[in-house]
Image (tube, rainbow, N blue to C red):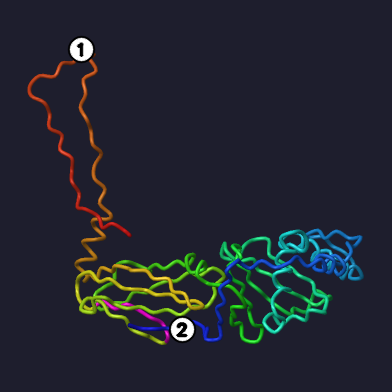
Amino acid sequence: MKKWKKTALGFLAVSVFTAGLAFPFSADAKAINQTITPKSTDTVYKDGSVFSSARSEKMRLAAKEQALAKYYITSGKKLDKAVALLEGLPSEKTGLDSSAPYFYRMDKSLTGNYFHHVKVFNPDMETQVGEYYLAKDDSCVFRRLSDNGDFELLEGSTEKLLKKVEVFPTNYIIPLHGAGKVLVRVPGNLPYDLTITSLNENIAKVNNENGQLTVTGNARGYADVLVEVEIGGYVKSAKIRYAVMDERDIAVYEARRAYVPPPIVIGMSWGWGHHHHGGPHHHHRGHGPHGHHRR
């Protein structure tokens, strides 16, 4: 059994909500964004346009305003809910001052098809003071720390998050004495702990090479490998079956994959004056070698 920690998560504290992450709506959140959102300039930015350097600042502001409207949510019920959730958490967790005005910005697209990505800025809209990932099912809230890029679980449970994690191999075939890898896809690229255990070390074993876990083929045959991904006290497990092959096995396998059987022709008489004499034809269907089923 080999373990590998992608990013330290020792400081993640899991607190399971019995009633979800519901917080009272904050009436100030929407007003803050309306107040500090800059007024539209009298200039509309056009790509490729030529203008005097005296207008460059106005054009730059116009481009930023257009980008805000295109890529981000800066007002509305969806943002209000996110802001209320963050303001309902203790300030020592979020790092936000409950008495300070902030500008909140949410990506229009979900991160990893699971998280609402929210950034918090000072009223100048330039200085970022916080970055957060809010699960779309309200099950957990993460904060990304600005000093080292680590993630901290602020509130909730990662149980539902782990159900969204994908585990798969780079290839189900490992060359004899070669190595294969296990790929893990986590919504939002959150850090995780990875444990890989070979259930048949005679055929394949797990090695740690410079912090990367690999599965090495020892002998020809099949080996099941147990993969465990841990985030915030919950584990997603998966079993992968590898086939360890030598050069001859691989050559035969590739030849079988490339083989295309000839089309099957069925003889029929349509009654146009042509009469078939003799016994029935036995059409031979070419049975090509069975291909390996990809799991």
Residue denoted by label 2: 5
Q: Is residue 32 magenta?
A: no
- In this view, 176 is above or below 209: above
Out of 82 and 63, give the one closest to the viewer: 82
Q: Secondary structure at mark 1?
A: loop
Is label 2 or label 1 in front? 2
Residue 126 percent coordinates (x, y): 79, 76
In the picture, the disc for residue 273 is: 1
The secondary structure type at the circle numbered 2 is strand
Judged by its main secondary structure, the magenta piece is: strand
Q: Residue at x 29, y 67 (%)?
A: 241
Could you classify mark 2 by the number of other residues whose Cα lies within 10 Å: few (under 14), some (14-19), or many (20 or more)?
A: some
Q: Nearer the viewer, residue 196 or 21?
A: 21
Image location of residue 174, percent across then percent down: 29, 71
The residue nearer to you, when weighing 257 against 151, is: 151
Residue 236 appears at what percent x and percent y? 43, 71
Q: Which residues are magenta?
A: 211-217
Quadrant for the N terminus in the image? bottom left
